[in-house]
Amino acid sequence: MLYKRLLAAVFAVVIGAAALAQTKTTVTSPNKNITLNFWLGDNGAPMYEVLYKNKSIMLPSGLGLELKETMTDKVLPSLTNNLTEVASMQISSNTTWKPVWGDVKEIRDNYTQLSVKLSQKTAEAIEFTIVFKVFDDGVGFRYEFAEQKNLKHFIVADEKTEFHLTGNHKAFWIPGDYDSNEFSPNVTSLSEVNGEDPKYAASIFAHQFFDKDAVQTPLMLKSADGLYINIHEAALVNYPAMNLHVDKASFNLTSKLVPDALGNKAYLQTPAKTPWRTIIVSDKATDILASHTILNLNEPSVIKDPSWIKPTKYVGVWWEMHVGKSTWDYAGSQNATNFDTKNLKASGKHGATTANVKRYIDFASKNGLDGVLVEGWNVGWEDWFGQYKENVFDFVTPYPDFDVKELHRYAASKKVKLIMHHETSGSATNYERQMDTAYRFMKANGYDAVKTGYVGHIIPRGEHHDGQWMVNHYVRVAQKTASYKIMLDAHEPVRPTGLSRTYPNWLACEAARGMEFNAWSEGNKPRHETIFPFTRFMGGPMDYTPGIFQLELNYWDKNKKETIHTTLAKQLALYVTICSPLQMAADLPEVYEKKMDAFQFIKDVALDWDDSKYLEAEPGEYITEARKAKGTNNWFVGAITNENARTATVDLSFLDAGKKYTATIYADADDADFEKNPAAYKISKQVVDSKMILSLKLARGGGCAISITPVK
């Protein structure tokens, strides 16, 4: 009898402890659509789940980190289990803020927050807090470490954040990689992810493949029951980028951080915090495009007076090198690895000459464009690529045929700004030594913006483009350029995570497969630009360089087989569907001069917006958007499709009621086709109002652009 009583008592204690461990703390979004539950599992493991409209989108998923000591490399007790809850707190916040530039003039920051303080069950316990913010369209969470007796300097050996999906969702993905995100986006089920398959991972020089079952973020997903889910991160500072390992049996995704040369992930000192992990969800694809959650999770601008930051539309000495008309290097070899640099002679093919740059300045001035980018202006391009060479460029010494002072004078006389180019060849150490000198040189010669590049292997050797050291480097460049009142366009960096809110001088990044791949590879598929707004653009604007009018590239070289896989009208529509304060008219002046009627849209389209309407969208299929130019009543519409022809529907109810507008429509011609007749377009005008719905025929690989202005 006594034995049975003892057994019953023990059983009651166990059940009570289990019930206590499984107690869930619930937090809901302000509109009640999203529910997040947090609890500690039986073994003291932190767990969370997410529901959308009472439908599970994240099954119970683990959280936590693995840490080490910095001096001894000793592994510390895990922060993934054996934890106890010290305290928790919920608050709500509903504010608005105005971005310096963006797709809307004001952004609402409305969320419910849960902060859970956890501690290890050990004598020398480490404490940390998991902070959840639940917005109307998604969730953000991160790990925070306060100053404490038992943790000061430490190494993040691994992060164990999980995203346990409910099924084998349709995925829009690129292979997991430590150094490149310039892959063509793939569309498969999660179970078909395979980074080793050549059809999914094209060869790129500077990349570091690590796991065939890994993908990069932003990862876009669509469930069988029609939910759209996006996984990414926000405010990536002092920490490596996150890839995701896909368990193809359970569909549980686990964070995989980019390591450094020693295999460690991050070096931190309390107080410390990780980036936010983000989940955006809706039953409407257009809501994903309209989300500002990632921006809201970033810190406010550190630039008190941003009046010097100007959205910029530009042309440049750039595309002509990609199509082979000219070269970056003075000697004209285009070899970039082993040319005799001691006996340079002018080849006549150098693109960045004083005379040629003046031609671009004239075109920009005549057509109201803001700037001219010049690549290949500085010495070093004969031997710069792929050899782990640390000291290539000094960023101040021009080639003999590039007159810095004369071009400064000439550009100023035409009210055009020159845009600097700093290719680092991956040598971040050299660039950091040269930054102050380079930026002083820029300001002395009239440059207010710089395009940086990180082509090749990273120096410090063994570091990766997306590791903690380089993440901090990109932020240092943003801070340093801001201190000189210089705007920044970073190419080959880590993918953006909303830091343009904190550093609005950081106008754009590349960090994806841009237009140039069409010039010398199999190119970008027609679906390419219908996927990017759901993936790469979630973290911030891209310098995609649209506006190519000469779509068949054998025009430049009869032996070239490459083509642009869009119609001309789609090239125009991209200026609306790609929301960026930095937009290039990427083709050559002589090409545009043959089609000035179509170029008129590039001249007219805005770069900064008071409002944006996401009218219809399906990732990988089509997108139709309308945007209202900052401080005006002018609207611009862009509609694009993939390889399938379709009809786009534009409901004009966003226009002011009772007013008439003139719509100038730049459309695919009836016989347009991205393969057979890409350059065929037609331009028409009609009077429209808010009660009208336009039906726009889009060709295969096509698009349509519309300029809408009030009738005077």
Image (cartoon, rainbow, N blue to C red):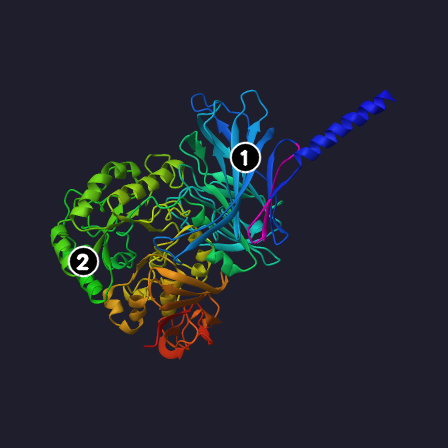
Figure quadrant of the C terminus = bottom left
- SS at mark 2? helix
The amino acid pointed to by label 1 is Gly
Residue 288, position as x, y percentages in the image: 50, 56
Which quadrant would the N terminus be assigned to in this image? top right
548 displayed left or right of 170: left
**In the image, is residue 530 above or below residue 42?**
below
Residue in the picture at 45% in, 64% down: 613
For disc 1, the marked residue is 64
Could you say which disc has been placed on residue 357 in the image? 2
Using the rendered image of the protein, determine whether residue 42 is visible from the camera's viewpoint.
yes
Label 1 environment density (alpha carbons within 10 Å; few <14, some 14–19, many ≥20): many
Separation of marks 2 and 1 at Cα, in angstroms: 54 Å
Does 373 sit left or right of 272 as displayed? Answer: left
Badge 2 density bin: few <14, some 14–19, many ≥20, Cα 10 Å? many
Q: Nearer the viewer, mark 2 or mark 1?
A: 1
Q: Is residue 28 magenta?
A: yes
Task: Tell me if residue 550 can be seen.
Answer: no
Find residue 652 and report its horizontal and vertical position in percent.
45, 72
Q: Earlier in the sequence, mark 2 or mark 1?
A: 1
> Residue 471: horizontal and vertical position, in percent?
38, 40
Q: Does the magenta-highlighted stretch encompass residue 546?
A: no
Q: Nearer the viewer, residue 371 or 556?
A: 371
Q: Please determine whether, in this image, residue 252 is positioned above or below residue 606.
A: above
> Which numbered dot is residue 255?
none
Where does the image place residue 189, in percent across and percent down from the top left?
A: 57, 53
Which span is picked out in magenta?
27-42
- Residue in the foreground of this view, choosing between 296 and 569: 296
Q: Residue at x 30, y 41 (%)?
A: 479
User: Would residue 555 appear left or right of 263 to someone viewing this image?
Assistant: left
Q: Amino acid at mark 2?
A: Val
